[in-house]
Image (cartoon, helix red, strand yellow):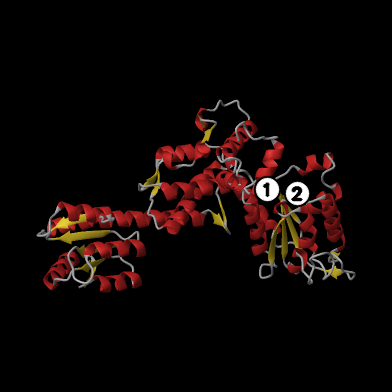
Amino acid sequence: MHRSRILVVDDEEIMRSSLSDWLKEDGYDVVAVEDGYKALDKIKSEEWDLAVVDLKMPKMDGIELLEKVNQMRPRLPVIIITAYATIDSAVMAMKEGAADYIVKPFNPEEISRVIGKLVEHQRLLKENILLRRALAKRFRFQDLIGKSPKMLRVIEMIKTVAPTKSTVLIRGESGTGKELVARAIHELGPRKKLPFIAAACGAIPESLLEAELFGYEKGAFTGAVSQHKGWIEIADKGTLFLDEIGDISPKTQIDLLRFLQEREFRRIGGKAPISIDIRIIAATNKHLEDMIAQGEFREDLYYRLNVITIEVPPLRERKEDIPILVGHFLEKYNLDTGKTIEGISEHAMKAIMEYDWPGNIRQLENAIEHAVVIADDVEIQQENLPQQFTVQGQKWHEIKPDVPLEVIERDHILQVLDANHWHIKKAASILGINRVTLYNKIKKYKLRRSKGE
């Protein structure tokens, strides 16, 4: 069984010796040093469960050491001990983040009680982290996290299609993790050691997309000062992931169809055909069948891409995965911020579970990051969650149950845009979607600036 490790820092030899003996009798693994600099070396190079630090020491006092420990190991609790029982020093120690404050002279029973309480708290915290990691690992496939029936079906489809050469079309709303599905297919297939090129078709202007896909020869057009290989050529022998395939122009659709039929292409300005062996995986958040009916997407290209379809469910249809995802993001942003938030309050989790998450997993991740950054408690509270949880001043859980999701999404997007003075990049970040998706939503819902904007 792991024995908790305690570092004692005191310039008085008799105090170091006494504290070490008492703590060893309680079953702890104890190391004692005489000054702050030696303590920092120990903390930097070894793992500790607790530090007991004297307030008044030469070279570096306890408060200064506490500040440096908080920067270096923010999760390490520090107890300050001193013979100088003043209110000012107690307030200063606690303000700087001391876990507790003990005044000399003290008895072994008092030390045992205070340290025992903190060590038990640390044990529970580590146990909680380990349980979250075990849970995430148990329900993690590649970088996909979930245990819901719909996600398990996605995972089974990935396992089935990965070893093949078949073209795959991944369908799902923005923020559902379509690129993660594509990467999982690549990583589980025979091309895993070869390139995986992700091409964000919707994020590149139409005038540049053809050049990025197929490349160009020197002098092919103004500004083409040297030969440039496109995504297709760079992905040779590997996988090309065409994200947001529904956004490509009719001209690029024709060029892409020709490549899929012949498996060769010409760079812009080039004469010799280039043969390429790549696997194509495409993704879209659009209803391609409607686009075909409206003449916006080629039917023959659709059938070339739609050999195997994987539908990635929106988060609102896999809510049993939310607690696992929340735990994963909580651990991620604890590490990023150096915080030690242990969980989420019942009210906050209820709010998270009942929300519809129009921005899906990307929006959930942004919400947890936001909550971790602003939370000042050991738990995330409901008030720490972002403004996404209100729609035009109305609590999301107060919205009438017969209101269609599209109406809620439209109103919410408009509210976020107006609140941010139609700053597209900022609004997209708050909504947890990319700018291209936001522009598409604005077009879809025919949104306009509110008066006064």
Q: Is residue 37 above or below residue 244?
A: below
Mark 1 surroundings: few (<14), some (14-19) or many (≥20) residues within 10 A = some
Query: In the displayed image of the protein, which residue is found farthest to the right?
Result: 271
- Count every numbered label the image shows and give the total: 2
Q: Tell me the amino acid under the disc marked 2.
A: Asp
119 or 89, which is in the foreground?
89
Question: Would residue 315 appear left or right of 55 to someone viewing this image?
Answer: right
Q: SS of the residue at dot 1?
A: helix
Contact between marks 2 and 1 (CB within 8 A): the answer is yes
On the question of residue 19 being in view, the answer is yes
Whole-percent x, y for residue 12 in the image: 14, 71
Residue at mark 1: 436
Q: Tell me the amino acid under the disc marked 1.
A: Val
**Quadrant placement of the C terminus:** top right
408 or 85, which is in the foreground?
85
Residue 166 is marked as none
Question: Would residue 104 appear left or right of 170 to someone viewing this image?
Answer: left
- What residue lies at 84% left-to-right and 48% top-to-bottom? 298
Q: Is residue 270 above or below residue 411?
A: below
